[in-house]
Amino acid sequence: MMARLKLTLVLTAATTLLAPAAALEAQAGGRYQVLIPYFEPLEGARDNFGKDASEDLRKMISTLATHEAIDRREIDREADRFDIDMDDLNCIRSIQLAAQIQAPIVICARYTQGADKSWTVDSEIRTVSTQETFALEPFTVPERGREEAARRIFEQFDRYNTQIRSAAICADYMASQQWDNALRTCDESLAVNPDAIGVRYQRARIMYELERYDEAMQDLEAVLGMNGFHEEALQLAGYISASLERDEDAREYYGRYLEVNPGNAAVRMNIAYELAQAGDPVGAMAFIQEGLDVDPENINLWEQFGGFAFTAGVEAQQASAVGQENGGGVAPEAVQHYRQAIEAYERVFEAKGAETPVGHLRNIVGAYIQLEEHEDAIRMSERVLETHPQEQQLWVYYADALQRSGRLDDAIVALDRVLELNPSHPNAALRQGNWLIEAGRLNDAVDVLTRASAGDSQKAEQAARLIFNEAYQNGYNEDRFDYAIEGLTAAKRLPGLGTAMMNQLNFWHGFSLYQSAIREQQPSTVPTAQATLPKFQEALQLLQQAGDYPATVNVNMTELLAGVNTYIEIQEAIIRRG
């Protein structure tokens, strides 16, 4: 199922099909005003038919309880204010005039006269606020049929009202999230006028809410087929496409939207955010970059660009096989994105200073660390810690950069600062211990880890595992048994270890002693026997204290203990013979 994210830009209510109504109540007692210009004669037809028929229609419309036609003289006065003769009011000019005088509806008609003197009328109703067209069925009336022509249009006007009422009810259901009822009433409205853009868009939103995404896209394409720059439709189509991982389609829809509003930074950022949330941070960066091309000093755009670039860098590195192929390194695409993130966030820091969100600053240092540019990471850390000295995570990043650059003691001091800020920090002391272990400073590591694990059995076990892993990997596995024994002995000194952990440590301690003694007992002289007999005896005691751990690593303890005892007997015999 598609992840459900909040659509921050797409209208959550219906389109404003009846928006001008409130403004008209004071003018017409709550009745919608209808502007009806003279019907337009075509192909040399006489104009008297159109003038008379339009006047008849005005009278009929004014009989309705819900609508009132604007008087011819009022239309003439309003047109004159804009230096237009009423005779020159075609449909387009009438819509423009209606918008100026807040008339929500225009009825336009054109006609021709046939050889038999009959009149063929083509008419439509325009909703001014949405620029939607409600096409009426063409008809033909006889030469003296101007009143019949007005009546035919008037009768079809009822179909328009039915469509508007259904659309309004649909909008109400949408507002209350009754999606099934909303779909039913929208379909009723579209059955009357399939080309109603606003209702078609409402239906697309309903399909989205019902998670019927393919049908939503079909409705959105229908909307865009009628109005290629319908802003809400472009946004919703882009969002659905991005959420379905159709990244190219998403960018195309969003790109068309921003052709209309290239300088709208807030909208651009919201669109980019939706793209990133849907899994396309690179596409989000492209949208922000276009905004920066228009407004390069917009810090909000730089701030968002930095976040998307950092995310893109992380994702590029995770998806890359570079680390597996050549033993390490940062993928080239990740390098590019990290550098973009650094540039963007440093611009933000220059502008906001101490007001810069700490997450941005961590990302700058983190990007430098990912790029293995540790000196830059240190420089930036020291700079941001001047403005954010209490941010423990920044101290952690600073310590990490110091350790990676070989400044271990400085790194330990930085983590000491973390522990001052937060004595219960979950891993600062463990990290100190791990770094000291890696540096071969085992005794220092044990001191640090002992303090860290005091009174905390969970931390004690974590610390013991750190030491055990080092002893096993770089000691036992490398046949450096003395190093392994040193580490395992140190791990056992940690306070509060559980039985399972002690069993594990005792086994490998004993087994390492056993392996070391086997090597040292050659060439089986009295001195070697005297030197190794205590080791074999201690190994036997430790192995006997391993509990049930050996079974977890498939060791046959009977055979192992027998072997140890055999070596003990051999050393004792050599000593007796000597």
Image: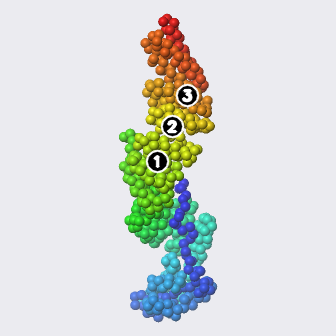
Residue at image coords 45%, 51%? 381
The three-letter code of the residue at mark 1 reads Tyr
For marks 3 and 1, give the one nearer the viewer.
1
> How many discs appear?
3
Q: Is residue 365 left or right of residue 200?
A: left
Residue drawn at point x = 58 percent, y = 27 percent: 503
Q: Are marks 3 and 1 in contact (CB under 8 Å)?
A: no
Instruction: Name the amino acid type tagged 2.
Output: Gly
Residue at (56, 29) in percent of width and height: 492
Looking at the rendered structure, the kind of residue marked 3 is Leu
Residue of label 2: 433
- Cα–Cα span, label 3 and label 1: 34 Å
Residue 195 in sight in this render: yes
Please determine whether, in this image, residue 414 is positioned above or below residue 110.
Answer: above
Real-space Cα separation, disc 2 to disc 1, in angstroms: 17 Å
Is 280 situated above or below 563?
A: below
Counting residues from the start of the chain, the first of labels 3 and 1 encountered is 1
Residue labelled with disc 1? 398
* Secondary-structure class at tag 3: helix
Q: Which sits in the foreground, 100 or 177? A: 100
Percent coordinates x, y for residue 312 in the rendering? 43, 53
Identify the mark at residue 505; answer none if there is no mark.
Answer: 3
Mark 3 or 2 closer to N-term?
2
Q: Is residue 277 visible to the viewer in this orientation of the structure?
A: no
